[in-house]
Image: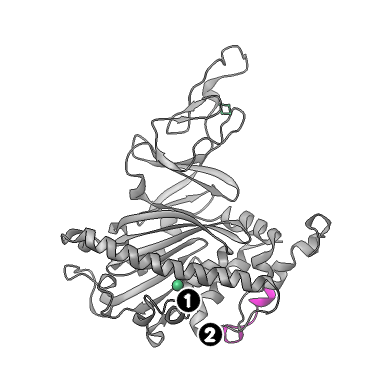
Amino acid sequence: MKDRATMTHHERIAPLAELQANVSVPFAQARAMPRSVYLSQDFLDIENRDIFGKEWLCAGRASALAKPGDYLTMEIAGKPVIVVRDRDMTLRAFSNVCMHRMSTLLQGSGNTRAIVCPYHAWTYSLDGSLRGTMAMEQNEGFCKDHYKLPTFRCEEWLGWIMVSINPDIEPAAQKFAHLGKLVERYGMENYVQAFSETMEWDTNWKILAENFMESYHVPICHRKTIGPQVSLDEVELEEGHPTYNYHCSLKGEENYLALAHPDNTRLEGEDRRRTYIISLYPGLFISLSPGYFWYLSLYPIAPGKVQVVYGGGLAPEFIADGKSAEHFAALKSLLDEVNEEDKGCTEKVFNGLRGGLAEPGHLSHLERPNYDFAKYIASKLTA
Ligand code: FES
Ligand SMILES: [Fe+2]
């Protein structure tokens, strides 16, 4: 492979041209995305600029930042970001970079009364304004009131914390109104998170996304866990929407947590065993069952590395029935196993496509969401 420094602009954007050609055929003839879009650093740079830098990304469930001072940190398109619950209970997102000599401020997640820079202790309030400094009174140009951490968009939507570094983005509730309506009867905003963990997988973020959005792999990759509960004949597919895609599967009696609890009066008929598998572009992937939910929120780190926030929890009826600890334990061990199986499958795909011994094959009709996702990616990127 050629050194990036000596590549021409045309060579750098070649993966984008390949992707555009790939999605220009109708679904009935579609193939998987070209190898280059998973391997190229230049392509990831374009994705960061045009997708992760422009869209809403999920920072987890709002219930994880329940108290004033609860915070988490994340990186969006290379920019360090803090999300914090302010004293007035507002969720705020701002730059995680000190305005003195530009150290990052907070790390990981936790609770804090103020944001204190670990370098020279410039101290910011939970609304991002500079509250205190040491030994700055001799600098004539310095005025504390002129410093405030730049803010980013942050909104709560159906219990999710949505963050965007794009100041002009449409409000999340508006942008995702179509999906909100589709799953309204599930009451996802009332589902209770039981766990969330952050991990890194050795694969491209899109391979993980694509794995989530098709159930074609479920009977095989998950044959030791949920595979036997999913019948491919019962998978319900819809054409994608510009902001998300989804498909549904009907769960059998074996997984009682996937079914509506007897006290759940919101859902009727087949909905009581219908799981929605939702891919909210670009990085939030939700499996929403009548009894539980789990999700992955993805951020690319490198072409072959993705950060994964993995979380899940129960519908309120399963929390209220007195056996919630038992339900949590059963759910967590099942989901951990499923996730481990997905990790294995998606890391194998990245390993496999690296060597160039195969080219993308045709898609099954069960991979309709993958085609819609490829079209979404192609539509957002510019040369
Ligand atoms: S870099 Fe933050 S106080 Fe100096
Ligand atoms: Fe899977």
Span shown in magenta: 20-29
Q: Residues within 10 Å of mark 2 (few under 14, many from 20)?
A: some
Q: Which mark is residue 199?
A: none
In the displayed structure, 271 sits above or below 122; it is below
Task: Tell me, yes or no, whether the two marked residues, 2 and 1, touch with CB atoms within 8 Å.
Answer: yes
Residue at point 63%, 76% (across, down): 23
Residue 48, given in percent of the width and then of the height, sits at 62, 55
Three-letter amino acid code at disc 2?
Ser
CA distance separating discs 2 and 1: 10 Å
Quadrant of ligand 1: it is top right
Does label 1 point to a residue whose CB lies under 8 Å from ligand 2?
no
Does the segment drawn in magenta span residue 199?
no
Query: In screen coordinates, is 345 left or right of 326?
Result: right
Does the segment drawn in magenta span residue 21?
yes
Q: Give the SS element for disc 2.
A: loop
Q: Which residue ends up furthest to the top in the rendered image? A: 138
Quarter of the view holding residue 141: top right
Three-letter amino acid code at disc 1?
Glu
Most foreground residue, 76 or 254: 254
Of the residues under marks 2 and 1, which one precedes in the sequence?
1
**Where is the C terminus found, in terms of image quarters?**
bottom right
Query: In screen coordinates, is 124 left or right of 193?
Result: right
In the displayed structure, 320 sits above or below 274; it is above
Q: Which residue is mark 1?
A: 214
Q: Which residue is mark 2?
A: 364
